Amino acid sequence: MNLSMSRDGVDDATLEEVAAVCHVSVEDIQDLYACTPLQMSTMAESSIRAGANVFQFVLSLASSVDLDRFCNALTRVFKQNSVLRTRLVNCRLGLQQVVTAEEHVTRRCLGDVWQYLRDIEARPMGLGSHLFRSAIINGSKLVLTMHHAIMDHTSLTPLFRDVLCVYHGGEPEKRAPFKDFVAKCTGIDETEARSFWASRFKGAPTIFPRVRPGHVPHATNREARKIALNQIGSGVPLAHVPSFIEVAWALTAGVYTDSESVAFGVVLSGRTRTLGGAETTLGPTMTIVPVHVNLKRSMTVEEALKERTTARRQLQAHPALQYGLPGIRSVSDAAQAASGFQTLLNIRPVLADPGEAAELSYEYMDEPQGAFGICLSCNLLDDGVMVEARSDPEIVCERQLHRTLNQFEHMLQSLMKVPLETKLDRLPKLNAHDRSEILQWNNRVPAKVENCLHNLFTAQAEERPTAMAVEAWDGSASYRDLNNMTDRLAQELRRRGVSTGDPVAFIFEKSLWTVVAVLAILKAGGVCVPIAASDPRARKEALVSGANAKMVLTSAAEHASSADIALDVFPVSAESMSKLPDVSGRVENGTSSPSDLAYIIFTSGSTGTPKGVMLEHHCLASSLTSLSRRFGWEPGFRMLQFAAHVWDISMGEMFGALLFGGCLCIPSEEARQSHLANFITSARVGWAWLTPTVMRTLSPGDVPGLQSLLSIGEPIDAGAARTWGEALRLINGWGPCEASILSAVAELAPGSRHPESIGTPVGCALWIVNKGNPNELAPVGSVGELLVEGPGVARGYLNDAAKTTASFIPPPPWAPSARDGERRFYRTGDLARYNPDGSICFVGRQDNQVKIRGQRFELGELEAVLSSCSEAQDLLASTKISGGRTELVAVVCLADMQLPSAVVLREVSEAYAETTTQRLRAIRDYANSRLPSFMVPTIWLAIEKMPRTESTKLDRAAVREWLRTRNLSAARAALDARMATALTPPATKNERLLQSIWSSVLAVPEEKVGRESTFVQLGGDSILAMQAACRCLKGGLCITTAAMLRNESLAAIAESSRATESNGDDVVPSTSKTASRHDGSGSVSEPGAVEILSTLNIRYPQCSQSNARFRRESLDGIVPATDAQAFMLATGETGGRGCYVDFTCEFKPALDTHRLRKACEQVILHHSILRTVFVQHGPVLFQAVFNDSPTGSVKEVTAEPERTLQFGRDAILARFHLVSDGQVCRRLCLEIHHALYDALSIALLFRDLDAAYSGRPLSDGPHYHSWVSHVADLDESAPRGFWRDMLQGSVMPHLVPRPAGTVPAGHPLDQRTQMRVPLRNMRTPCGTPSSVFKAAWSVLLSLALGMEDVVFGQVSANRYLTTLPGIEQVRGPCINYLPARARLGMSMTLASVIEQMQHQTTASMPYHHYPFRSIIRDCTDWPSCTRFSSAVTYQNHGALRPSLEIGDATGSFSGHGTLGDSADIWVIATPGAEDLEVEFLYSSRVLPAEQIHWISQAFLTILEAIPTAEGQSLSHIHESVRSAMGSYVVPLGPADSLSNPLNGHPQTPPLQAREAVLRAWEELELVPGDQGEDCSMFSCGADVVAALLLSEQYRQRGYDISIRDVVQHPTRLMQACLVAMKR
């Protein structure tokens, strides 16, 4: 910091530089001096995010206020307080504040206040700009905008008091200049300050919430609530409440971090007596300081409160309070850790009203929020605390913020209620809201399947005897053959003495005979005990002895080495089986019961002693049945048998196939280990269970036929969803052997919000409990131990009562009591937490937690991050004491084919040192960019190959034993030396400039800054980044502050700067990808474009087969119709003239008819959409563009024209009618289908008509069909992922009930109800009027239907793609129908709902182009025929006006038409000058008058309440509406009165008619597999568009069957009757 405190000490060159930045003369600079730490940090934040750190106030001025006098008072206060005349400038002296001599002028203007606020947001305050602005709007609203660098919360009341005092003729209070306060800050004794702050932090506190390095938080989620505290004033003084709040938050953070030591930030006023009078100044004296709280569980509530009270007083009284975060951060490692806090706590009194006088009153206030994960403003009241919370949605989503506030409220109220001597560990951690959610998530546990495994197999064998059961490298067997062989072997086993419950061990390699042996053991009543063929003999003997197995089955290959391992050893092979006698009659049943043991599987225990898990028949049968239902296993599917037989996953493979009619595909050991991809392909495997380690050896291209992949055994890589999720069905599974194979599964896609989730329970309930006490449930979001409850839980451990008692526990006190039958709970020892959506995130093993620098974390979490780095193939993290301290070690197998990979646990040779150094540094940098520093390994070891267990998992025990013998100090020193010298010097001019600037700003030698270096790793922070960005700009390099804080390398930042400079030259990407496709998915059809010939060559041959009019020479091109076009055509044709609109213009004076006709023809040629017809071919509706105006596109008439347009094969859907006497035209009518226009393109069309008539050039935007092709070429993975995430778990609410799987029969929305509300009601800083409108509609749906999760439709202009220049000028209907979703909790405020809708709107804009039928089909679980029950449109484009100019004439312009049956109700909002017009479109056959009255009036009540209801909870709003309107009565359903053309006709159609229907269904790919002719098309994936295409198919074949007929008769049999009747 430069400590210059006077203008006099500044040289002329610097003054001139400063004056130029501020756009003032040097004479206008009155003073120039240093900034406080707060000023520097707030301005740095503003440079990162425009508009940050700004106060905005809207105050109402009484009508009696003399505006001139008021403005003069404001000007005088501005002049008296130099801080208000201050700007901040980054100059050669560093960041300085400049006091200017300018006078302040308050703007006076007319207009909308909220629009003014948006306008000034577009002119953000920053370096060199004014930091104080004022305006008076409409003479009644005072708007003040002030940057946090010149104002804080405590200065607001003095500011308003001074202005009112001067207004009334008084003198403002004498205050110390802000410069005096700055002098106190810059004059702090350095030694004393460092000593004081160093004493405040001991150890390394935990930070909550965690923020990934490089992410700059932006808290946009909001929630406000009042926490009632009746104890205030009656036992708890108001002055003590801050201590209660701090302790409550420390306990809350401790719950989520599992730590007694936490750090967070607090805001203090900074106005202490130690300032010697400077505290009276007007300006930002507040300070933000880190607080480190250690709350030992043994402390009492009283002790904790006293500790916080004392600490707070010490802070307020110490002269080093204003030392600043950068200074505090530097005093020690502990201080640096605490200064990285991500929660800011601001405890303050409620802001006072501006004064006693009635001149001013608050209307709206928006305060700056720090760049933290969570910001909590706690306003102290007499009876509680008003909490205003914000969070960054990427760090703490809205749902989790709500839960966090629940936890905070719970802890705060608990502290207030309990006696002061209560120990902290006695406080209940779980709040009631979380408990309710957790119980709801686990409210159902499937019933036990009371059956035996072999009986289920036998049932399959009897049902499908000839189906293939096993295809192995050494033989195959049908279900009948396998059943017979296992019967014969079971008979032999019983003959040899095996009876019910006898353990029988088996030792096999991969083989058909393994399956035979297992089923035979079960049929004989025995218990399967798998032993690995690769185990040493001593272990085999130990397991046989431990299981007390008197008999062992082996393969032929293993028989010799196992001959004397038990009393009876029998080889199972083709030879031995051939000697067994046949079974006469059915094998005896009843040898086992469902409660008998089926398996004993030995797992490795933490002590090294194997534990025998006892699994009963019903355990496995129950689990497998649940898995089958979840996965959809159906007869004939093909399952890979990959897992080792000693791993419980092998049971999932084997019995998953054989109990449900599948085929088990078994590779040889050689194929399994070396040629797995080839086997999967050749064996036509559809299902595979693989560990992430094995998955990393494959790619989707290696196994194109694989349909489903289940990742098991190890935490899945974060990148697996991206790699595999697009190519197949990717499932992440988790489950301990003790709970029968799998207990949780998650289906993952490329866009999954939680790509490492283990999902939700399957076949059980999953509980997360306090790690040390299973009798306490863990709050949602905190880490705890996983408990499994369900029928799959094992009996216990063989011959180990102590371990069984410890792990298999009785129902805890919190367990629901309503479950029937025996209940088993298993403590897994695995740690997990709930994701915000209720799914579960696996964290690691309870015995795999480590503590580094005071921070506790899971090694599994570290490994998951490092595994997602492309440089790492395999890795393991561990700890070791080295040099007297605990070091974090990463053992890595590198993903480099050039490195040796033959020997297990051998370090890579020094001969490859350069390569390993580069690779390890890349992984380290990757870790630094994604993990907090304490989680980044300090020792890195590269080895050739990792050791593996039989189940292909990493052999952790072997690696840790190897580490125990290594000298890690020497390894670390050698690698550190190589990494230090391996920096790559800059290679380009921009890189060298960056190197020089970073070196200067960070005070780092240039040779220490390489291409790989990152700004943050070199010691950069936000303030230094701002300075570096300014220097870059002066050097001609445009780089943002945020880019340098994202942990990007110097080379990457330099590269992005070049891309920024060249953006203006970007062109639209080539569409050759689309043009080359042959799948009917789109092509370019731009008139005159080079691609047109190839496009026609591709498209025309397909379409010409079904339509002779499509000839190459008459067409410009063919592309598919958009989903919106197809939907409008289909719903418009289901009844009446839906979606046809008549636009009429009456001209005065009249226009020249001939000239107007020519103008219309010119517009038709210019707007290719007007030359478009639609044609069906296969399952696609195409739009073909004629290269000339279609006949009949312009007609001259003498009277009111007849509307004759009708969708049909090749029919034009747009026509100009010129009502003329032959000479002049007084009226122009455009009859057009909505599939050809949207509001923006129709306005453009009429502007072009004016231009053509007047002889001016027409618009030059992209042709519509070029836009269609461009959209078709875009990558679909990101939009598909977005919509999947947004709609996951959603259901469509219906205002009108409809039978599932049906399409509305076709009632045009021909009724309308209108109302108006003041437009000012829609204006709020929480969101745009459109978001307000949608939020209000979501509240109405929630109220009407009693739902807290609602979905409705919306119309998007869909012109947001930045990849197509001129998109706003596209000449056609870009609109799309999209879902909107609102998740509503009754405790939420209306403001939070508005913000939710606003955030959803802005987040979804890049994906508005994704077809809505694809959204329904690919991104939801809804039936494909789903349509929106309700839909809203906010028409704020202003494109269509009531008057129209053509040439010299001005015409009155109007449009009339009806919507098709596209929703039960459309709500259309159109903003006017003062009011918002709201129109409800509906059919009285669908929504009766009573329901429409309730809907319209309830909606009006909500909209009218918005100005005062933003802060109200939804429950309060619901109650208010109900008290006024009552409850919504759901109608019985549409009053359909369709005539049935089949009445009186035979219901058994002839074969010819049935074949015609079958061909039509096959053409549209609707044939429903093995379902019959009475299956509805809407159960086969069809929707209303498919009904339209089917109607077109019939018409092309000569049958007059309408879409209405198809919808009413949705089965093949019914349609065959129609064909027979309508030939």
Image (cartoon, rainbow, N blue to C red):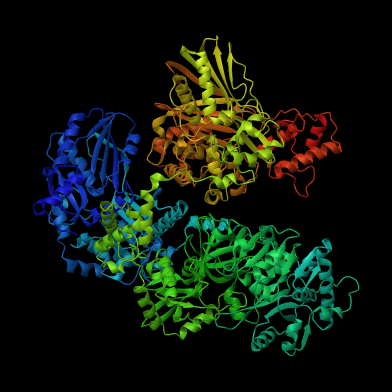
Residue 95 position (above or below residue 871) = above
Side of 1602 relative to 112 (left or right): right
Side of 981 relative to 762 (left or right): left
Question: Could you say where residue 1410 lies in the image, as x and y percent from the top left?
Answer: 55, 44
Which residue is pictured at 54% across the width and 26% down the height? 1164
Residue 1479 position (above or below residue 694) = above
Which residue is pictured at 68% across the width and 39% down the height? 1101
Which residue is pictured at 27% across the width and 61% down the height? 996
Question: Could you say where residue 1208 lies in the image, as x and y percent from the top left?
Answer: 68, 28
Number of marks drawn: 0
Question: Could you say where residue 539 lies in the image, as x and y percent from the top left?
Answer: 64, 86
Q: Nearer the viewer, residue 1480 or 1089?
A: 1089
Screen quadrant of the N terminus: bottom left
The answer to whether one can see residue 1207 in this image is yes
Question: Could you say where residue 665 lies in the image, as x and y percent from the top left?
Answer: 72, 68
Quadrant of the rendered image containing residue 757 = bottom right
Q: Nearer the viewer, residue 1362 or 774?
A: 1362
Residue 152 position (above or below residue 483) = above
Q: Nearer the viewer, residue 418 or 1154?
A: 1154
